[in-house]
Amino acid sequence: MPRDPVCKMEINRDDAAAESEYKGRTFYFCSEECKESFDKRPEDYMEKGKKAAMK
Ligand SMILES: [Zn+2]
């Protein structure tokens, strides 16, 4: 099940309040607020588990 990258909630695609594409992946959000947070700073939410080792 996809996970809201902002609040880490599991999101049922059918129930997603919002979705956003970033770097060819689709992300699902529980609310517009989470989507807005993601859209502002997507890189902050891309990493899961990994610490910022991409720089
Ligand atoms: Zn959320």
Image: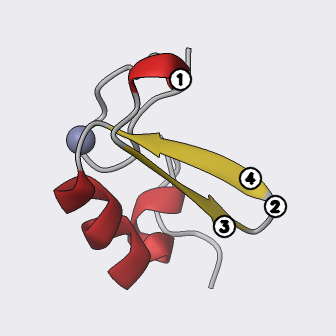
Cβ atoms under marks 2 and 3 closer than 8 Å: yes
Q: Which comes before the other along the chain, label 1 or label 2?
A: 1
Q: Which residue lies furthest to the right in this view?
A: 24
Q: Mark 4 to mark 3: distance in Å?
A: 5 Å
Residue at the image position 35 percent from the left and 83 percent from the top: 40
The tag on residue 25 is: 4
Determine whether 6 is above or below 46 in the image: above
Note whether ligand 1 is within 8 Å of mark 2.
no
Query: How many residues crowd around disc 3 within 10 Å: few (fewer than 14), some, or many (20 or more)?
Result: few
Q: In this view, does 50 lie to the left or right of 54?
A: left
Residue 24 falls in which quadrant of the image?
bottom right
Circle 1: residue type? Arg
Say which quadrant the C terminus sits in: bottom right
Please name the residue that numbered disc 2 is placed on: 24
Tell me the residue at 49%/68% (across/down): 52
Indicate the secondary structure of the residue bearing disc 2.
Answer: loop
Report how far apart the C-alphas of labels 2 and 3 lie in the structure.
5 Å
Which amino acid does the dot numbered 4 rest on?
Arg
Q: Dot 4 lies on which element?
A: strand
Residue 20 in the image, given as x and y percentages of width and height: 55, 59
Task: Say if mark 4 contacts mark 3, CB within 8 Å.
Answer: yes
17 shown above or below 52: above
* Residue tagged 1: 13
Q: Position of residue 49 (x, y in %)?
A: 47, 40
Q: Looking at the picture, which amino acid does disc 3 mark?
A: Tyr
Pick the residue in front: 10 or 32: 32
Label 3: which secondary element? strand
Q: Mark 3 points at which residue?
A: 22
Image point (39%, 21%), residue name:
15
